[in-house]
Image: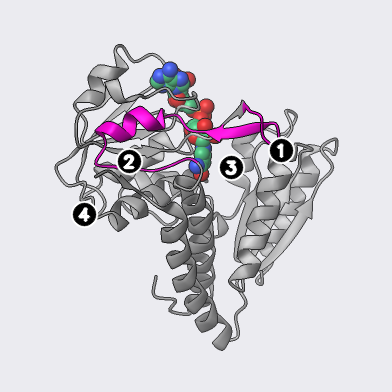
Amino acid sequence: MTSIIDGNAVAADIREELADSVATLKDAGVTPRLATVLMNDKQASETYVSMKQRDCEEIGIAAEDVRIDSDAPAEELFDTVAELNAREDVHGILVQDPTPDHVPDERVLSAVDPAKDVDGFHPENVGKLVAGNARFKPCTPHGIQKLLESEGVDTEGKEVVVVGRSNIVGKPLANLLVQKGAGGNATVTVCHSRTDDLAAHTRRADVVVAAAGVTELVDGSMLSEGTVVVDVGINRVDADTEKGYELVGDVEFESAKEKASAITPVPGGVGPMTRAMLLYNTVKAAGEQTGVDVTL
Ligand code: NDP
């Protein structure tokens, strides 16, 4: 029997634990606060930001919704982030991607105080993660680690193939999986669009993580019996639904399910975990900045 990994359920458990940590912070007089900064007009970004705001409020984290006109000069964004960095009542800051073309990405990543960088994308935090001393694990890779843990998948000594080498998913995940200790100790291969014969790699994997943004790139013929499959992809495909589309992963679910011992669905797999781990990082940030033990 293939286990369908229920990301919604695992995320709900994590949120429940985090609500206890938020209560601990509040007992100590601290209300954890996340500021999201949105500087684009894209509907998808607007949706992501409002979901993050709602998630925070549900477990008692204060959420501040900062909007900057997409035509505004870049300095307006950097001044806003500097003000948030300086505020003691703001523990986490997240600049929603993408920012407009006239705002240099590199500067955005470096602008947020590393202690408040709940996305974990500041160069200092990337360096700490690579060195095996992560301050904030980026949300999607961390969520994947938690999902594997919840499923009882021990990555020690396993062959893990990560399909995708982005800075937000593939690279940080590969770095986490090769670290010494729990949740790591794996032998990791990172594949990308220039990889020759992707299937040769996925077929010898114990765990395949698909994070390419290509609809149903990985199918059952590319997997061995018993592989654990984690599908990160979120691709919109036209469909006869109310919204006119449906969400499909990077894995062809039906054929992959026939081979996998465990598999995440899309939606309801990695997505909810990414959202939960942002809350985790915000609670962690609040604990560290105020000296309150939040026992995560
Ligand atoms: P990017 O577009 O930044 O990176 C995609 C990566 O996949 C690149 O490294 C690219 O290679 C590689 N790739 C593309 N095509 C192929 C191919 N045919 N074979 C092998 N590798 C390929 O995407 P992200 O990492 O940001 O996101 C990946 C997917 O995950 C998207 O669908 C995104 O929506 C989803 N996502 C889901 C999240 C969640 O919470 N569930 C969170 C974040 C993302 P190259 O580097 O050579 O171009």
Q: Mark 4 highlights which residue?
A: 181
Of residue 289 and residue 175, the one placed in the foreground of this image is: 175
* Position of 164 relative to 79 (above/below): above
Q: Amino acid at mark 4?
A: Gly
Task: Let me know if residue 237 is in the magenta part.
Answer: no
Q: Amino acid at mark 1?
A: Glu
Question: For the magenta stretch, what is the residue range?
Answer: 238-266
Of residue 210 and residue 63, the one placed in the foreground of this image is: 210
Q: CA distance from mark 3 to mark 4?
A: 28 Å
Q: Mark 2 highlights which residue?
A: 175
Rendered residue at 48%/72% (across/down): 16
Of residue 96 and residue 274, the one placed in the foreground of this image is: 274
Tell me which label, 3 or 2, sits earlier in the chain: 3
Confirm or deny contact between disc 1 and disc 4 (CB under 8 A): no
Disc 2 secondary structure class: helix
Disc 3 secondary structure class: helix
Q: Mark 1 highlights which residue?
A: 242
Classify 10 Å Cα crowding around label 1: few (below 14), some (14-19), many (20 and above): few
Confirm or deny contact between disc 1 and disc 3 (CB under 8 A): no
